[in-house]
Image: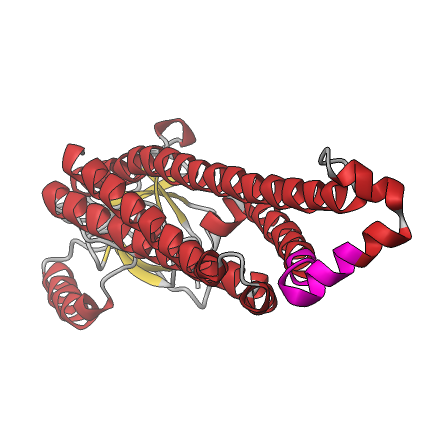
């Protein structure tokens, strides 16, 4: 378990490192632009929220696939340890569950990126408007057009200062929101994967142990409800039955029954034989452990089956043995084929 948990921790750390790199690359052009107006505008225009979100979703999908493979490996190893055959139902292969678990955090991240993009445009436009010769000239002329605003500029309270303060605050706020959204997303991913891992590991162990227990019960009981009969044994059984029938007739110890005339059984006096007769039981016939429903069911036949009658001493019941080895009791009113 410890080794498995370490693998989960290691892969999650790599996932977060990958996401950090993706988001960092998206922001790099903006960082490189510095205070150059043209580069700031290019960075703002080139910043693709769609591209960033597509990368995040692809990474989450990879995490989902990796998780499923790890669950398979764990289940296969545990099945081998318990000496049972692995099948997919013993693992956890649900697709898209990671994205579903963190969809609200993904939406918040998308909203923060859109807000950042708007703030970068506003800041780039401001820098372009108030930088270079054109920007300086505009601010100089504005001082003549509005002397009061020009005087306020001496104290950092002009309209330009207020605009600068607004765009800078908006940019800083949007950047902080991106950081907080990213942190919340990483935390949600970590919590979702670790919690599901711990829960599903226990579930897989319980499933495998249950399959193991059911297999052992089937071996002890010889047959369980729903077991398929071995039809390959039927030709051999038919030969054995014919031989036993001839032997029984030759010593005069078998009861003859006509299934067409409706006549009563003609008893021939002779030593009793354990082989009383043969019947064909129809599909869905229930075989009981004893000559009463209180004994409980042993099996339900899944197809028409030949059987030898071994005992009819209990009124209303017959003890039988099928051609695939199942032995038990059936009611005499059981529908025959």
Q: Position of residue 104 (x, y in %)?
A: 59, 43
Whether residue 276 is situated above or below residue 3 in the rendered picture: below
- Location of the N terminus by quadrant is top left
Query: What range is drawn magenta here?
Result: 126-140
Q: Position of residue 48 (x, y in %)?
A: 56, 65
Q: Position of residue 214 (x, y in %)?
A: 26, 39
Q: Residue at x 21, y 58 (%)?
A: 324
Q: Is residue 324 left or right of residue 295?
A: left
For the residue pair 332 and 18, the one nearer the viewer reads as 18
For the residue pair 164 and 271, the one nearer the viewer reads as 164
Q: Position of residue 95 (x, y in %)?
A: 44, 56
For the residue pair 249 and 28, the one nearer the viewer reads as 28
Q: Is residue 163 left or right of residue 198?
A: right
Whether residue 175 is situated above or below residue 41 in the rendered picture: above
Say how the picture is coloured. secondary structure
Q: Is residue 205 magenta?
A: no
Whether residue 89 is situated above or below residue 165 in the rendered picture: below
**Observer able to see residue 134:** yes
For the residue pair 263 and 178, the one nearer the viewer reads as 178
| Figure quadrant of residue 58 | bottom left
Q: Is residue 134 magenta?
A: yes
Q: Residue at x 38, y 38 (%)?
A: 190
**Observer able to see residue 57:** no
Whether residue 9 is situated above or below residue 109 in the rendered picture: above
Q: Residue at x 59, y 41 (%)?
A: 172
Q: Is residue 252 left or right of residue 58?
A: left
- The tally of labels here is 0
């Amino acid at each position: 378990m410890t080794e498995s948990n370490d693998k989960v921790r290691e892969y999650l750390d790599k996932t977060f490192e990958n996401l950090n790199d993706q988001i960092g690359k998206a922001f790099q052009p903006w960082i490189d632009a510095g205070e150059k107006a043209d580069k700031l505008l290019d960075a703002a225009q080139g910043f693709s929220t769609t591209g960033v979100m597509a990368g995040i979703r692809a990474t989450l999908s990879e995490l989902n696939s990796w998780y499923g493979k790890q669950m398979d490996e764990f289940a296969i190893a545990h099945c081998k340890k318990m000496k049972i055959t692995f099948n997919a139902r013993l693992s956890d292969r649900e697709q898209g569950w990671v994205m579903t678990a963190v969809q609200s955090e993904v939406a918040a991240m998308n909203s923060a990126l859109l807000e950042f993009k708007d703030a970068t445009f506003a800041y780039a436009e401001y820098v372009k408007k108030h930088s270079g010769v054109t920007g300086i000239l505009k601010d100089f002329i504005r001082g003549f057009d509005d002397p009061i605003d020009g005087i306020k500029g001496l104290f950092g309270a002009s309209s330009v200062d207020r605009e600068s303060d607004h765009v800078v605050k908006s940019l800083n706020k949007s950047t902080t929101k991106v950081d907080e959204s990213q942190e919340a997303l990483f935390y949600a991913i970590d919590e979702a994967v670790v919690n599901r891992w711990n829960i599903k590991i226990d579930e897989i162990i319980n499933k495998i142990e249950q399959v193991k227990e059911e297999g052992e019960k089937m071996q002890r009981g010889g047959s369980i409800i729903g077991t398929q009969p071995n039809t390959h044994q039927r030709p051999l059984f038919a030969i054995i039955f014919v031989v036993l029938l001839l032997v029984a007739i030759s010593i005069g110890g078998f009861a003859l029954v006509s299934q067409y005339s409706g006549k009563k059984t003609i008893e021939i006096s002779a030593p009793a034989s354990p082989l009383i007769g043969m019947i064909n039981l129809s599909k869905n016939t229930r075989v009981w452990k004893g000559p009463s429903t209180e004994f409980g069911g042993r099996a339900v036949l899944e197809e028409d089956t030949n059987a030898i009658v071994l005992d009819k001493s209990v009124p209303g019941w017959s003890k039988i043995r099928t051609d695939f080895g199942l032995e038990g009791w059936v009611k005499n009113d059981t529908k025959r084929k």
